[in-house]
Amino acid sequence: MTYLPPDRFFSPDPTTRSLALELYGPVANLPIISPHGHVAPRLFSDPNATFGSPADLFIIPDHYVTRMLYSQGIPLESLGVPRRDGGAVESDHRQIWRTFCQNFHLFRGTPSGIWLAHELSEVFGIDEKPCAANADRLYDLIAEKLAQPEFSPRALFKRFNLEVLSTTDAATDTLELHQSIRESWDGRIIPCFRPDGVVNLDAPNWRQNIEKLEQVTNQPITNYQSFIRALEQRREFFKAIGATATDHAALTPATAELTLVEAETIFQRALQGQLEADDATRFTAHLLMEMARMSVEDGLVMQLHPGSLRNHNEAIFQKFGLDKGCDIPLQTEYTRNLRPLLNKYGNDPRLNLLVFTLDETSYSRELATLAGHYPALKLGPPWWFHDSLNGMARYFEQVMETAGLYNTAGFNDDTRAFCSIPARHDVWRRASANWVAGLAVRHIVDLDDAHAMMNDLAVGLARRAYKL
Amino acid sequence: MTYLPPDRFFSPDPTTRSLALELYGPVANLPIISPHGHVAPRLFSDPNATFGSPADLFIIPDHYVTRMLYSQGIPLESLGVPRRDGGAVESDHRQIWRTFCQNFHLFRGTPSGIWLAHELSEVFGIDEKPCAANADRLYDLIAEKLAQPEFSPRALFKRFNLEVLSTTDAATDTLELHQSIRESWDGRIIPCFRPDGVVNLDAPNWRQNIEKLEQVTNQPITNYQSFIRALEQRREFFKAIGATATDHAALTPATAELTLVEAETIFQRALQGQLEADDATRFTAHLLMEMARMSVEDGLVMQLHPGSLRNHNEAIFQKFGLDKGCDIPLQTEYTRNLRPLLNKYGNDPRLNLLVFTLDETSYSRELATLAGHYPALKLGPPWWFHDSLNGMARYFEQVMETAGLYNTAGFNDDTRAFCSIPARHDVWRRASANWVAGLAVRHIVDLDDAHAMMNDLAVGLARRAYKL
Amino acid sequence: MTYLPPDRFFSPDPTTRSLALELYGPVANLPIISPHGHVAPRLFSDPNATFGSPADLFIIPDHYVTRMLYSQGIPLESLGVPRRDGGAVESDHRQIWRTFCQNFHLFRGTPSGIWLAHELSEVFGIDEKPCAANADRLYDLIAEKLAQPEFSPRALFKRFNLEVLSTTDAATDTLELHQSIRESWDGRIIPCFRPDGVVNLDAPNWRQNIEKLEQVTNQPITNYQSFIRALEQRREFFKAIGATATDHAALTPATAELTLVEAETIFQRALQGQLEADDATRFTAHLLMEMARMSVEDGLVMQLHPGSLRNHNEAIFQKFGLDKGCDIPLQTEYTRNLRPLLNKYGNDPRLNLLVFTLDETSYSRELATLAGHYPALKLGPPWWFHDSLNGMARYFEQVMETAGLYNTAGFNDDTRAFCSIPARHDVWRRASANWVAGLAVRHIVDLDDAHAMMNDLAVGLARRAYKL
C-alpha cells in the first residue's frame, strides 16, 4: 500500500475534495517558512553532522512519540531515553526500533502517525506501515540512508526547501553556533530570544542564569535596572545575528505593571534568594510588559506561549528531566490577563504580539475577539497538541469568522524533530486548502479570494507576522 | 460574478444541499420577527428620515465593520467615527468609502462579509465585490438610491417584510418616538425595557439616571422601595407602548437575594455616592431576581445578556466612547449563578427567562441542561460574535440534543444596522435548513418533522418566546 | 414510514456512508458489554419479574424523558412520578402514555428520541411515530407484549445478546439479589462497588450508612482505620460476587492526601456530627487516593464520575427526590486536581483509573493529554448528556488525536432503562463506524486498521479496560 495519496486529508465530498486539491497544488511546493521551533543549531553548524541511528532520529528525542508508548506501559528506559543519573537504559537502537514498530498501532489516527508516515515515505522512500515483521528491514534501510551525505541535516534543509528556520535560544546563549552557521553556509537559520530562564524568578538555576547573563553582557547585574539593560543588550545582539522575534513561556498570560520600586524590591529579594509568595508571578507579569515595551522600541516580534503546567509527572521529571511528554495544559484566561499590556501597547502598530493557546475554549471567546480589535495583536497557529488535522479544523472554524484571517500569523511547526517539518507544513497546507475549499463551495468566498487566501496561509501571513 | 447563488451556505453534499434548499424554500420569504435589536426609533418616527451617505449606512456606525479595519491599523478617525471631544475626523464620506473598499479583503470568510454582500446585492442590486477600482462607482450608485423615497427606512421596513421590530430603550426613556411612530404609521415597532443604567449602581451617570427616573415617573426616589415602585411603573408604561420584553446586561449572571434591609442600605450608599466594594455586584444580582419577580407578575419576557467586558480598550473608550468594537467576552458560569433565581422562579410557567451567552463552552455543559429542565428558562440564539454560520452550526450541534429545540427562542439579530436585518435572518434560515437537512438525511428526523422544525426556527419559536 | 433504515446516522457523503456501513456490519451483532449502568438487579433475581405497563417501562422512571416533558411545563405529577410524601399523582398509566405521545415532538433530534424509536421498533415491532392519534393503539400493543414471557427481563437480556451487565451498588449493599441471580441463572450480571454514601461525609444519611456498614462487615467502625478496613473488606466481598470495578462520584476530581492524624480527626468529627467547613471536601479528596491505593492492591478498576451539581432544583428534590433530571454539570478542572493521585499512583500499571467528564472543554485540553501520558489513566466514553450522536462525534474528534484510541475505555451506557441498552450501544457502534470511515476515506488510517479499530471500539476496549 501507499500511505500518501495526493488527495489525502481532504473532505470526502467530491466537489470539495477536487477544489481543495486545486487550491493545494500551487502552494504545495512553496518554500517552507519555519519561524518558531526547537531544532538544535548544532545540526547545521557542523557540515558533517548526522542524525544518528533510526532510533535517534524517530524515537528517543521525540516526546510526542515516547509519551504515547509510555502511556501504554512501555518504560522510557526501554526506549533509550537517557536518565539524569546516568542509569542504564536500552542502548541497542535496533531493539528500541523494534519496540516502536511492534506498537505502531498506538499511533492510529494521531498526528504523530501522520508525520511518521510522511517522513518514512517522502524522506526515506518507505511506503510500508511499520510492524514487528518489517522492523529489522526498515531499520537497515533507514540506517543505510542516514549514512549518506544526501541525508545530512544541511542537505535535507535544502531538499526540504526551507527558506528560513528559527531556533529558540536562551537569553544567555552566546549564539556561537549560529555565528558559525552564518559564516560557513547559506542556509538561513536564525535565533529567537527566549529569556524565560532569567525572567521567571522561580526558573530552575535562576541565579546561575543571571551570572551567565553577567558574563555574556560583560557587566554586573546588581539591580533591576542593570538587569533590564542586560536584556536590552542581549536583544540587540540577537537581532544582529538575525533574530526577528522573542518568545516567552508563562504559566498564565497575566500582565501587570509594577512600580520601579516594587520591581527593584522583588529583584533584590530574588538576588538574595529570599523570594516571597507571588514575587515570581508578579515579576513575570511585569516583565511581559517590559518585553512589549522593548519590542515597540527594537521591532522584535513578541511571542507568548502560556498555559502549560510543565513536568506534571514528578517521577518522570526526577528521572528523565524536562520535555518528556508530561506537560499538561491548563485553563487559560486572556481577556483580563492581557488587558494591562494591551491597554498600554495594544494600539501601537510597532508592536507585533503573537499569542498562542493550549486552551481552545479561548479561541472564539477571547483570542479571536481580541485579535479582531487590537492592531498589535495576532493569533498564533494551533499549538502543540492542537497541531493536528482536527486541531486545525477547529482553529479555522472557531477563530477566523471573528478574528479575520489577516489577524492570524500563518503556521509554525514548533518542533524539535527536523525531519517532521515538511510533514507538519504539508498537513497545514492541506488543512488550509480543505478549509478554504469548504468556504468556496458554499459560496462564502469566490475563487480569486480562495487562491489569495491559500498563498497567505502557506507563506504570506507567517512572513509578515515574523518580519521575514 | 454574482455573490448570491440560491444554494449558498448549504453543505456541499448534493443530497443534503438539495434537501436544505427544499426546506429553506417555504420559509425564505416568511415575515421577519425581530424581537431584540438596537435600531434607532428616530429612523421611523420621521416619515422623511434617510440613511445618509453610503458611509453613514455601511461603515461609520457599524462596529463590526470598523473593528476589523481598526485591527489592521486603520485609525477610527480615518473612518469618520466621531470623537467625544469633537476633534477632527475624516469628513469626506467618499474617502471613507474608498478606504473600506480598498480593504474589503479583510472581510473574507467573516459574517460581516456575508451581510455586506447580501445588502449590496439584495438592497442595492450590486453584485460586485468592492475594491479600489470600483469604489467611486459603487459610492455613486448607492448614494443615488439612498436619495430615493423607496430607500427610506419606512419603505425598506415594508420591503423587508418585517412583522415586528423591537428596539432597546433605557428605563428612563420617554418613548416619545415610539408613541409618534404608533400615531403616524402602521409598522409595528416596539420598545424593550432595559434598566441597566439605573439597576447597575456603578453605571456611568447612575445618579443622573435616577434623577431622570424621578422625572419620568413624577415621584421622588429616596429609598429602595420607591426605586422598585418606579421600575414597576416604568414597566407598565413600556407595556402600554407595546413592549413585551425586558433586557438586562450584567458582567456575570450572578443572582442572589438581599434582605430588604441590605437592599435599602446599599441603595442609600449609592444615593450618597458612597458605594462599597461589591455593593454594585450584589445589588445587580438581587435586582435580577426582582426583575424575575416583576416578570412573573406583569408577564414581560426577561432577557439576560451577561459576560461581556465592556470597553476593554480604554484609549478607544476615552476617545470614541461606547460600542466601538472593543467589548470582549469573559468566561461565564451559569449553573451556580442562576441557581437562586431558578430555585425561586424557575418552576413558574408565568416566567419566560431567555438567557444568552458569549461563552460557547456553556452551551452543552450548562445552558442546554438547564433549559432542558426548568420550565421558565429558554436559551436565546447564538449571540454577537457567534451570530455567524459557524456560530450557528455550533449552537445547533451543542445545544439541541440536550435542550431540545422547543426550549430555544428562535433567532434575533441584535443589530444597529437596519439594512443588515434581512441578511442576518436569511443566514439563520439557511443555517437552520442546513442543520435540519443534516438530521433528515441521516434519518434522525423525518420530513414531516423537518418542515415543522423549519417553521418554528424561522418564526414560531421567536413569536412564542417573545409573546409576539 | 420506518424509523430505522440500515444506514441511519452515517455521513450523507456516499463514499463515507457506504464504508461506514461496511465497517459497522461485522460489529453490529457482537455481544454487548455493559460495564457501567444502573439497571435494578431485582429485574433479574426474580425469574417472573416484569417491566409493568408501557408507562412504567418508557416514562415514569426515565429522567431523560420526564425532564424534557417537565421543561415544557408538564407537571411530574401528571407523568406519574411518585412523590416523597405519597401525595396524589396520575395513576392512570394510559393517560400518562397519552401525554407522552401528544408531546413526542419534543424529542425531535434528541438522543431520547433516537433510543425510543429504536426500542419501539426493535423490541416491540412498532415503526410508527407516537402521536395523539395512535397513543391508545400503541399502548395496547406494547402492554400486550409486556405480558408475554418473551418480554421478561431475563428473556430480553438473552435476546439483546448481553455478554455482561454491571449494576451499581452501595458499599453497604448485601448483594443478596446478585447472589440469587448467580445461583438461579446464567446471565452474567455483576455488581460495582460505589461507596459515595459512606465516603462523602456530607452524603444524606451518612451516619445511618456507617451503621449499615458496621452491620454488613460485622465490626464496629469507631475510627478512621476501622472505616478503611471495612471498605477493604467490602471490596473483597464485591469481588467475590463478580465485581471488577468501583465507581466514585464527586463534585470535583480533587485529590489530596491527608496525614493519618488529619484523616482520623475529620472522621471523628463526622462521627460526632460536628463536621467543619471543608471537612467533607478534603476527606473525599483523600479517600479518592485511598481508593486508588486499594485498586492497586486488589485490582478493581476505579471509575471517577465528577462534575455534576446534584439536585439543582430544590423544589423538585423536596417533592420527588433524587434523579429527576435536575442534576446540572459544572466546569471541571482535572490537570491540577488529579495531580496528587497521578503522581502517587499514575505510573503504576496495576491501577486502571477511568475518568469521565461532563465538561467537554476538558477533552482536548486536559483529559486527552493526561490519558496520553499516564499509564494508569484511561478516558471513559462520552457521558450522560454527551451520550449522543454529536457528543460522540465531539469525543472522537477532540480526544483521539491526543489521547490515542488505546487510552480510551470503549463504551458504556450508564442507564437505568434496560430496554434502551441495545439502542445506546447501536448508536455508539454507528458513531464509531462513521468516525473510522471518515478517517479511512481521508487516508488517515487504512482499511486493516479501520476494521481493527471497530472491533476495539465495539467490545475490545471495554473488555480490557474493565477486565471483563
Image (cartoon, coloured by chain):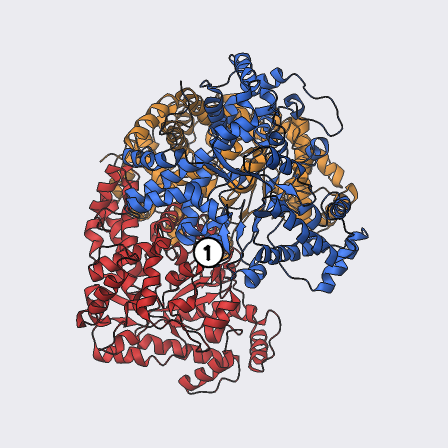
Chain colours: A blue, B red, C orange
User: In terms of depth relative to the viewer, which is nearer, C464 or C18?
Assistant: C18
Which quadrant holds residue B42?
Answer: bottom left
Residue A71 in view in this figure:
yes
Q: Split into 4 quadrants, where in the image is the N terminus of chain A? A: top left
Q: Is residue B242 left or right of residue C67?
A: left
Amino acid type shown at disc 1: Thr
Identify the residue at the far right of this view.
Answer: A272
The answer to which of A323 and A76 lies nearer the viewer is: A323
Horizontal and vertical percent for residue C269? 74, 50
- The image quadrant of residue A299 is bottom right
Q: Which residue is mark 1?
A: A369
Relative height, residue A21 to residue B375 (above, below): above
Q: Please state the horizontal and vertical placement of residue B339, each as a whole percent of the image.
A: 51, 58
Chain hosting mark 1:
A
Q: Is residue A152 above or below residue C174?
A: above
Judged left or right of residue B184, residue C409 is: right
Residue C59 is at least partly visible in this image = no
SS label for mark 1: helix
